[in-house]
Amino acid sequence: MTDVRDTDMMGAEVLDESLWKIRMRLLWRSFKRNWALFSQSKMGVVGVVIVGFFGFLAILHPILMATAWKGQEAIYDPVIGADSVIVEKTVVTEVTDPSTEMSFTEAMITGEFFPEEGMIIEVPIAPAPPNAKHLLGTDPFGRDIFSQLMFGARAAFILGVIAATSAVVLATVVGSVAAYYGGWMDTWLMRQADLILLLPLLPLLIVIGSFWEIGLWQLGILIGILSGLGATAIILKSQALSVKVKPFNDAARVAGGGNRHIIVRHIIPNVLPLSFLFMMFEVTGAIFLEATLSFFGLLSIPMSWGIMINTSHTQGYTLFGLRAWWLLFPAGLAVTLFAAGFFLIGRAMDVVVNPRLRTR
Amino acid sequence: MTRLWRNRSVALMVLLVVLAMVAAACTSDSDDTTTTTAAAGDGGETTTTAAATETTEATEATDATTTTAAAAATGFTYTLGMTSDIVSNNYWAYIGPDGTVYMQYVFGPTKPSLFTIQYPGLIVAPDVAVGLPAEPVEEGDVWTITQSMRPDYVWSDGSPLTAHDVVFTYTTVRDAGLGGDWISAYPYTDTSEPQLTNVEAVDDYTVKYTYASFPGGAVWPHNTGVASIMPKAPWEAIVTEALASEDPGATIYGADAFEIGDLSGGPVNYNGREEGAFVENVANTAYSNAGMEHIFYVNGSYEQNGQLYFGEGGGDVLSAYKDGPFLDRTAFSIYGDQAAAMLALADGEIDYWINPLGVSPGLRQQGLEAENLDVAVNPTNGFRYLAFNLRKSPGKFLEYRQALAYMIDKEFLTKNVLQGVAFPLYVLVPEGNQAWYNEEFAEEVAAKYVGLDENTRLQLANETLVAGGFTWETDPVTDEDGVITPGVGLIDPDGVKLVQQEIMAPPASYDPLRATAALWIEGWMEKLGIDAKANPTDFNTIVAKVWPGIGEEITFDTYILGWSLGNPAWPTFHESFFHTRHWAETDDGGNATGYSDAEFDQLADDMFALKVSEQDAAYDKIWEMEAKLVEDLPYIVLFDTPITEFFTKDVTFPFTSTLSGIQALAGMQGNVAK
Amino acid sequence: MVRFIGKRLLQMGLLFIVFLTILFFLLNAQPGDISQQFVGNPDIPPEAKEILRARLGLDQPLFFQYLNYVKNVLTLNLGQSFDHFPRPVSEILLQALPRTLYLFLTATLLSYLVGFQTGKLVAWKRDTPIERFTMVGSIILYTVFYPWFAILMLWFFGSKLGLFPLGKFLDPEKWFDSPYTANQVFNMMLLSALVAAILVGAVYWFTHKIVEPKPRQRARRLLLALVAIGMVVFWMVSPMSQYAADIAYHTILPVTTLTLVFYAAITLLTRSSMLETLREDYIFTARAKGVPEKVIRDRHAARNALLPVTTSFVLSIAAVIGGGIVTESIFSWPGLGLTLLNAVTAEDIPVAMGALAFIGFLALVAHLIADILYAVLDPRIRVES
Amino acid sequence: MTQTVSRDTPMLEVRNLVMNYGTKDGMVSAVEDVSFTLARGDSLGLVGESGCGKTSIALSLIRLLPDNAVVKQGEVILDGENMLELSPEEMRMRRWDDISMVFQGAMNSWNPVYRVGDQIREAIDIHWDEKPTVREANAKIAELFELVGIDPSMMERYPHEFSGGMKQRAVIAMALSCDPKIIIADEPTTALDVIVQEQVLEELRQIQHDLGMSIIYISHDIAVIAEITNHIGVMYAGKLVEYGPTVDVFARPRHPYSWLLLSSTPSVTGPRMKLAPLEGEPPNLLDPPSGCRFHPRCPFATDRCVAEEPPMEDIVEGHRLACWNHDQVPTTAKETE
């Protein structure tokens, strides 16, 4: 956190060079230094690689849709796409070759309630196992899993960014204000934070999500508000408190800076590094909540990893286990890895932000 | 360091608990056998005594019913898997506010009625009543029905079921102001049409109903005649007490029916539950219909105990069976998860999985692969549809609706998009309702749409729109090969360009079929030059927008929902959905589209004026209404899914081919055999 | 200390009521209400809807509904369920409580005990393959998508290996003629655990006065063995044992699943807490005194590392409860979480609100217990009180 | 190898001790070829700037070095036994029994969650030949507490209930609890305020005098060392540069570093002098200066100092130092112009 302060202090002393150049240079220098610290942690690098991979997937999806899959939206769209591999089967009493024949029962399942021997019925194949056309197969509705996975990555990033940004912005403001003003404002904000911290977020969101229509943005902001007023606010407040007692605040006040000026110019910039750290953990939390709520079918989102799991679960494929592995594993692993990626980055960033943790 | 113990004590505590459990587990086997022997030895007596000593609450439950029922049992335990628990043990509440399908599974077969609908032929036949439903008689201002009842029908405790029980049921419903299905069963309110003003016992076995106006087949017998009859003896005190209380309904619904010793007049009686785990029904050994013979003929005729009730009889037999109960006990084992229920079924842990939605595709696959399972596939009594708002442009323009009907390729939607889990529909009466279905007509309607390619569809739709006076900002263009480039910016006959049209449908997490259909319909609408937007909307939000309450403006564009239809033996839903008097904004009724057609209203009213004996005339009216609807298209009926059910080969049902499946008959607890 | 906790709880309790109020208005402002359930059935006339609305009090102005709600909360019956009408919400929640408590306590205690031990050992074995393996495993378990993990567990142990039942908390066949309700058995199990805990506490309390360590230890061992034997004998002779065993058997998979995830979190936390503690001067002092390494680890380092782990317990309560909902849903365990889920699907606002309030209340109580525990563990706080 | 132990043969002999820290950037030679002896009942002060290796020597003596530290060579002979060759388990039993320690930060030397008495008893339980009962141990602790001037009832209290001085006294009591041969006092008073410092030092001296044990004082404060030791070793950059009787070294510091160090310290008792600053920074031990490690800062440095490392030589009997130009060092403290 010292780096940002340096930037700030030194920026004030600049005489002949334009300010932004110096800031950029300092930023670059501090970035290099921090990256050196960060990359000491192998786990952190693994985290960056994982997140980078998902970032690549998220970007790849619109590109593929615009190039390789152009004109094939009907097949590859993650939501309405469906691959119509349709096979004609003959209705027979004794099925000898399941690829060309079907039983009366199977015929009835297709809606032909009065099947007759020798009838020819078209049946689609879904979920299809991975093949050249669908790298990860299709889901029970014939939709391309790989496309869904990439689309889900985008949804995850959007959610993570909204939740983390709103949480950290709110928490930074709340923490700074509570630390700076103290008094009843502090008491109110901190008790409120304690309460949110204690209250299980998931049941609350389950209740809100099932009675209200909640989409990706609403969920992101909701999570942001709840955690921004909660745990994150507490931690950022204690950080702000430690910054508050630093002499440059007095200097600023002597120089005639108002309260808001001091909060905005001095306290918040110094709290920011820790805020960034919390953004990482925030993303982990938000993606878990989204996936869990989607798993319960409580969100109005066209497609996400949670919905993928929900679909295979409600369609009854989860207990197929390895037989339908492409329904069971990609989405679950994606949520897990994505969360792990940000968690690992967060842990490694912790070392950068908290000098106490550096290896001696 | 002495403080360290607190940490260790926790460890020890847990260790102890674990040890205790292990110990208990070791002893459980031997205990198990002794208990079973005891229970088998002298039946329910052991159980109930134990219950009386161990639990204070259960003391009152030691009543004759339970004991006799359990003691005399000789059959088998019919184990059903169920994915949700019941919410009450009170029959009043089941017909009232707690009317879930799971309540129906457990309590449906516990109360008799004057008439019942006999499956699979959907024939109205006597249960407690004698003979066919009595004809309504005009007596001055009012219409009366005098129905005689069987003198030999008894409750599960052996006491006779009399006309006083019927009167008691009606007066309780009326005086306590009970709602829910009680109102449709006994339409006592002054807004009811026709109002059931009185029910009296002419003698012990004759009951007389008084209606304020003529009761058509839909009311008699199809509401009141098939309504549940409650036993007076166990309930009288509670009802008297309830009527004196602030909210009589709540008091009646809140009573613990098991403690009171509610009686059964059906094949089984409720025998307690373990919340979240299982519900238990036991055989009603006093069941009056035990041994009753039913014969359904292919030609639709129905014979009961050798007596012909419907049709001319003769010919091939569709289904013949005798009433039980053959079981000893029905156990509803509750699974929170569908997959778990399926596995339990495959493992033979349960005999049948009773499930209102049928089995999902993945589990169906597992079921088909399981050696020990049999399957029943049936059509359901319902459909999913797209509804227009006929109060405003463009929904109010017939050609707009017709054009869209051309565009929606239901075959493609169900086969290619929905992967064959659904089948297309063209008329409202479901195919499975054989007695009422008009296959010829349905095929005729379907023929208008089936097999058209997209270009032809577009061409037909555009022609229809042009005929209706619609124009485009950029007109559709047909090239020399006949390929049409869609138009852009559809303008209605009043010269107003269409605003964005919203298609509300439940989100994919709630119902992927409807959500997906909405997205495809969006695409088809766009081909007509309409700016459309499929909007995944919470079920509640759709309902709130479609039925905002009396006097509220209804502003939706289109929505996709599904109907599960009521009584299949006398379909009245055409009237509910499309009669002008059921407008959502005036009546909060089923007519959400705002469809209003004098001719249709007349047909519906005519149908309501028909008696149950005039089923052929009713059939004709229904298909006349259908003919209006396929032209006017307030709904575009989309598709439905079949219901697939699995059961072990150990159990036998008298028939498995029945509308909405075995679940609609509460698992046939009265007829199942092992 | 006591006053500090008390004041804080009071403030939070008041805020909690404010939150419930906001939630009440939020939920009641949502589109539609429970009377819509009849929309699905064309046979039910519109009057039925009005009757239901009147019966549930939904026809009254929102503010009156709120006053009624406050009255119900204050009288602790929490109103009547819409879905299970007219059952009081409190009854529904109390029915589910022992089941949730049982799951929650077992999983929490197990994960803390095992997680703490593992974290301790792992911190001690820094830079060994065991450490790396445990760390990677813990991070995976910690970040695993819990519902998915639960499904995998169910699939693998329940379906594939067939070792454990697939969901449910008892086997109906064994319970048909049971003289007990499941809750009686749950309560007995919880009670016996409580009694055992109290007895163990008493043993330590009374032997605490024996000054010399050796006889003290001997006395403790003897008495603890007596308690253990007592428990075992109690359950062996108890007619409830077969039922308790059935429940215990059904508990294994959900508890293991829930435990594993929190176990990972505790392990990670304990490890970093241990590493911090090991840098403290008093650890060096202990070494200089010639204290054996194992004693340093267990008595000096771990005892202090326990403090931040205890604090984190407060933070994890919310998470365990959240995980509990998923567990209950996937393993068909009819506790508070499943009650909540069922209530929200059935639009049962009173039960949903009640369950949420109850869960919040549980969290507050757990928080209080954790605060007290912390005070007991840390003499610096204890003495001040 | 049996030796008769007499007052004359040193009880502790450190020979050519070399100790390095392995770091990411290379080896740091923290202790370089240090030898000294300590007789029974004697007290030795080790003085030097922070980071000069004083504490490293202490840690080498009790063999509680950090994981990355390696004793490259040398011997630590206590009563004829090389401590560096003992097995870890044997060494553990020697700690506190033979060599106990009073630490720099008494504030943090106490485990906050256990009673002070219990923590002392822990050492007693481990090291007394016959494990005492709690009563016996408590009696001993009470005795020690009285010796260091604490109310014996305080042993039932927790560390946070002690004041800073009391904690330090209690640490001393703990150090005495097993009657060790040597006590290493590493900056025992740094964290205390001046008055308490004096008291604690006085007590330490008294105790040492009364009990006749040996003490190694480690301090950067040469005045403290002067007050209570009879031998002094001056360390610079991991090397012992001057060693001798305290009186001698103070009277006439012969190594330029000692001379500067003494000059930079105000003396309460001695003549008033102007303070001479010690200029420059201690060297980087990753890459120590060639020759004499002090040469970059030495006012008397010559080419030889850069090229050759001066050996440790007896200048006067019992007074050794390592400097090529020790005769250049003025006899009086440096005066600034």
Image (cartoon, rainbow, N blue to C red):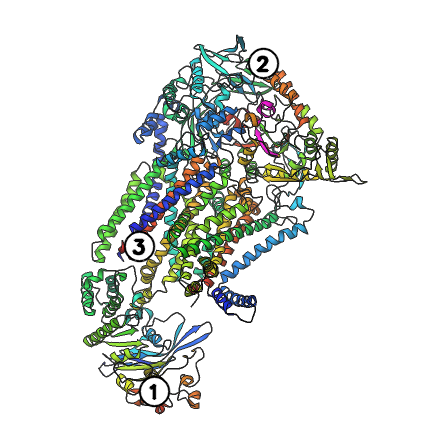
Query: For the residues carrying marks 3 and 2, which lies nearer the camera in this image?
Result: 3
Residue A194 percent coordinates (x, y): 39, 50
Instruction: Give residue A140's quadrant in the image.
Output: top right
* Secondary structure state at the residue bearing disc 3: helix
Amino acid bearing label 3: Leu
Q: Are marks 3 and 2 on the same chain?
A: no
* Secondary structure state at the residue bearing disc 1: loop
Pointer 3 indicates a residue of which chain? C
Q: Tell me if residue C360 is in the magenta stretch.
A: no
The residue identified by callout 1 is: D334
CB within 8 Å, label 1 to label 2: no
The residue identified by callout 2 is: B613
* Image vertical order of residue B15 relative to residue B381, above or below: below
* Image vertical order of residue D174 relative to residue B328, above or below: below
- For marks 1 and 3, give the CA distance: 57 Å
Pointer 2 indicates a residue of which chain? B
The residue identified by callout 3 is: C377
Pointer 1 indicates a residue of which chain? D
Q: Are marks 1 and 2 on the same chain?
A: no
Question: Front-most of A192 and B367?
Answer: A192
Examine the rendering and report whether any part of residue B453 can be seen: no
Amino acid bearing label 1: Lys
Residue B24 percent coordinates (x, y): 34, 41
Query: Range of the magenta residues?
Result: B558-583
